[in-house]
Amino acid sequence: MADPASTPLGKMLLEEITPVVMVLCTPYVEESCLKNGLSLIQLLSPFCDFTNIDVPVRTASDQPYRLRKFKLRLFYSSDIRQPNLEVAKERLKKVITHVGEKNFLESSDPSQVNNLLSRPESEMLPSWFQFFNKELVRTLSFSDHEAFDHPVACLLVVSSKDDEPVNRFVDLFNTNKLPSLLNDGAMDPKIMKHYLLLHDNQDGPFNKATKLLADMRNAFGQNDCQIICINSSQDGKIHHQDNPWAPFKSDALPTENLGCFLNLDDLNEIKDFMQELSSKHIIPYMEQKIRVLNQQVSATRKGFRNQIKNLWWRKGKEDTIDTPNGPVYTFNSIESQIRILGDYAFMLGDYELALSNYRLISTDYKLDKAWKRYAGVQEMMGLTYFLLDQSRKDAEYCMENAFNTYLKLGSAGRRNATRCGLWWAEMLKTRDQLKEAATVYFRICGEDTLHSAVMLEQASFCYLLSKPPMLHKYGFHLVLSGDHYKKCDQIKHAIRTYRSAIPVYKGTTWSLIKDHVHFHIGQWYALLGMYDVAVTHMLEVLASTHQSKTMQELFLRDFLQIVQKTGKTFEVLKLQLPVINISSLKVIFEDQRTNASAAAASVKESLWRSLEEDMIPSSTARSNWLELQSKIIPRKYKESNICVAGEALKVDIEFKNPLQIRISVSSVSLMCELSANPEEDANSSNNEVQNNEDRTSTSSGDINSCLILSEVDFSLEGGETTVVQLTVTPRIEGILKIVGVKWKLSSAVVGLCNFEFNPVNKRVVRGRRKQHSPSSDLKFLVIKSLPRLEGFIHSLPEKTYAGDLRPLVLELSNQSKFPVKNLKMKISNPRFLYAGNQKELNADFPACLKKKMNVEKSGSHANVNKTLQNLFHFPEDISVQEETSLSWPLWFHAAVPGSIPLYITIYYEMEGVSSIMKYRTLRMHYNLQVLPSLDVSFQLSTRPSRSQEFLLRMDVVNKTSSECFQVHQLSSVGQQWEISLLQPVDSILPSQSLFAGQSLLCFFMLKDHRRSSTSEDSIPSLSHIQSDVRLGPQDNSEAFFDVSSSPLADFHDCERSSQGMSSQGCEYKSF
């Protein structure tokens, strides 16, 4: 260990345990000193600390050594008394409050722990700790059981302006004016006296003062009288750059010029006087006193005979009753003499002599049960061991013993225990026993909450400086300290300590204590009226999912109250309430591909591309149409998506309430930027949008704005998640960028969330994507308004039964001012849906399906090729004019049961509207649920005797649970088959209806006309010979359903195609 005297504790001991000089002066002396803004003691104090005095001293055993450092403490006689406890507490409170104000104004953001640990220890520790500790120690000055505060000398100062200065010296040392400790016998009143004549050069010539000095020396002795001159400056304009009096005048104003009448000669004279007083008077006096006392102690207490005598005299005192203060010892008792001897030796640096006397008296006090004096001696023994740099174990044992003994005295020893603990902790810190020092600071904490706060804060830094750093204990003790500060209304200190703890818990799993710290900092800043900072810290606890429901309600309520007090609306970036799932972000926009519904927008792009491959122009069938416009679109925006002015872009965002309580969210809208069109110079390398103000709109439905943004309000229950769809509609051409989303929480604070572009997390529902900048996913080139068809299929059922056949109407409307033409339509599953003939639009259903009388049958139906190719071309003369609609018939047939998706694409072209976009497609998607109805099966067998005839068995089962069906007819489709019923219908189906779960069994005769004819000339002239059997009442005169005409024949061909059957063979249809 380094020289103990150079350690913080050593320096503190050399400042606090030093000789005391009692000062007595006349009013004229103070008057002369006050001309400089100083009292007499303040004037002299800067010159009482000697760091290189070099005075030869001899120990009691006549061993010489040199005293290098020495200090005097000056006190007026009126101040030599035990400080009033309440006054002392108030002074310490002012010290802490002043430091809190100063540090709060100078505070900055707390450093990261790693940055803090990289600093030197001197920069890490608050500088005011040492000042506070000294002030706390000084509250125990002038106790009756310790001698190092007893005056060793008295300095009597009289002004040359005083009348009869010699008599004034005599009057000053009047016993009636001396401190009570000297008159009560606790201190020796027979102390060294030194007489000083103070001459103010502004009061007259020096000659008078010289004569007065001669009279003083005749009265009090040649060596004990001196004179000094002050105020040699006549104008009082001297300015001292170093200002040595600043530490001793805490109430000095910054503009106050201390020592303005003291020139350099005055300062040198004062300095010489104080050094001479110390080296030639006080030190020799103390040295002589030590010799005398040592001789007395040796004669009465040292040696075997004296020790036996002392023990015999004190025998039986261990049976006496304990009292708080123990026996009363006067200054002339042998116990007091030994204590004075030890303290004098300690102050002169003769630590061996001091330790031997402390040991000697320690036993006496213990036997006398003078516990306070015993603890005081143990305390001094520990400090002496430390300064001797001997026996760490003995030093710590003495400090531990003293500390515990003080505590046993209760309130009478509490403050002494605090002082002992401070010195003990400093001792441990010097020896790098920082964890043990922190424990001592923690033990010092007692009934005084404010003092405990300071001790806990000092303990926290011990944990921080330990090797390795104990960061959690550092942060925990800071929080404890801040809590104690708050109890004492030291809010700024509480904020400072709590803020220092923030880096410790940042990034850790200690969520509860993090919430505690931020929440209370926010509350305390609000108490100081600093609402902006308060809101910042309260935001940290809003999304505390780990807290209970009660605490979440408390956090949100207090946060909203603080925001309300600010009187303004806060905008918070990345507000965590509610939580926005960026990975769920889904952008839906339309370029040349438009959607009739949200269901169509959710279909995979690959499915639409495969469906549209034969529809779009062949030049773009195998490439992205956008790539072909490279000469039209500016280079900077080639990778941007394209949208159309006046058409909404939709963004689906997932919001989640992470709390257990209900929250209200309002005014949810997108944040967008819309800039003007860039110059279309494909060869320019500086093709950027410059000097264009971003134009945004935040009000929904503002038709005069460049953007129309939707706003959504909703509330979320605890843990609830919802997906919100927001829209933005650009009204002019330009470059649109979706920046983020904003919302209002409880109508009090605006949350902002910027979309950080991540290609993995963004889903853009549109065409093929090339490898490009992620930011382009939310960046759009807005082109001028284009025609856009809207489509809807009327009467399409969501749920039906297998075999259902019905007409539908496709309605296409054009709300733009430009017509569209060259319409095409492609349906993914023609077994269920296909386009009819325009003549069928207003046909009477089902009468339109029945056979027409006296109409010659055609050999084929008109829509065979159309159905097989799955692509329908609207007539060339068909167009959808501006602000009109087009209706077109469709036929629906529920071919098979199951969940059936239908995908429909309508292609149309625009002429002379846009050079970028020549055509558009309308995508429609429907999901159908087809339920089972009738299960029909056939079994065919030949008749051995007649090869052209066959027996046909038909089984029909109603698979529904509640539906009833009527069976009208069975038809055979082919060129040579004739069908007939083998039994009456009434015996087969008496009720004429097939109820749920009921089955039907019928037998028919099939006859092959080809085999029965001898030549091709005998084959009937019709290309299709139809045979129909009525399964209902035979007297029914209604016409049969015509299975050879559209739409029945078309759906029949689709079924044959899907089953891979040829046109040859026999088919059956039942109705």
Image: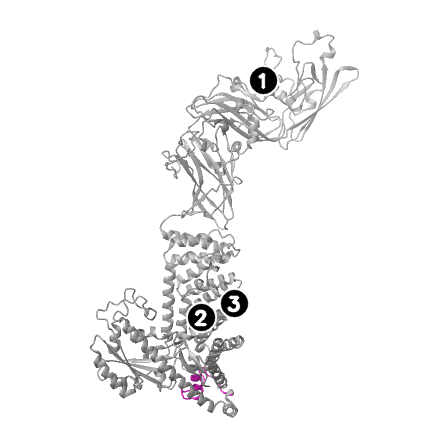
Q: Which residue appears farthest toward the top when viewing the image? A: 1017
The residue singled out by tag 3 in the image is: 435
Q: Looking at the rendering, which quadrant does residue 482 occupy?
A: bottom left
Residue type, label 1: Asn
Earlier sequence position, callout 3 versus callout 1: 3
Label at residue 863? 1
Q: Which residues are magenta?
A: 319-341
The residue singled out by tag 2 in the image is: 8
Task: Estimate the spatial distance between the alpha carbons at disc 2 and disc 1, rounded to whole Å.
Answer: 106 Å
Residue 606 image offset from top left, x and y in percent: 57, 31
Nearer mark to the viewer, of 2 and 3: 2
Please name the colour scheme applied to the rendered image. one colour
Earlier sequence position, callout 2 versus callout 1: 2
Task: Estimate the spatial distance between the alpha carbons at disc 3 and disc 1, rounded to whole Å.
Answer: 95 Å
Nearer mark to the viewer, of 2 and 1: 2
Residue sitting at x 49%, y 55%: 506
Label at residue 793? none
Q: Decide: few, some or many residues near mark 2? Use Cα within 10 Å; few <14, some 14-19, many ≥20.
A: some
Q: Looking at the rendering, which quadrant does residue 191 occupy?
A: bottom left
Residue type, label 2: Pro
Q: Is residue 51 above or below residue 562?
A: below
Q: Decide: few, some or many residues near mark 3? Use Cα within 10 Å; few <14, some 14-19, many ≥20.
A: many
Residue sitting at x 45%, y 75%: 414
Residue 499 image offset from top left, x and y in percent: 44, 58
Residue 895 falls inside the magenta stretch: no
Res. 798 visible in picture: no
Q: Is residue 483 above or below residue 979?
A: below
Q: Nearer the viewer, residue 703 or 394?
A: 394
Res. 47 visible in picture: yes
Residue type, label 3: Lys
Residue 232 image offset from top left, x and y in percent: 24, 73
Q: Decide: few, some or many residues near mark 1? Use Cα within 10 Å; few <14, some 14-19, many ≥20.
A: many
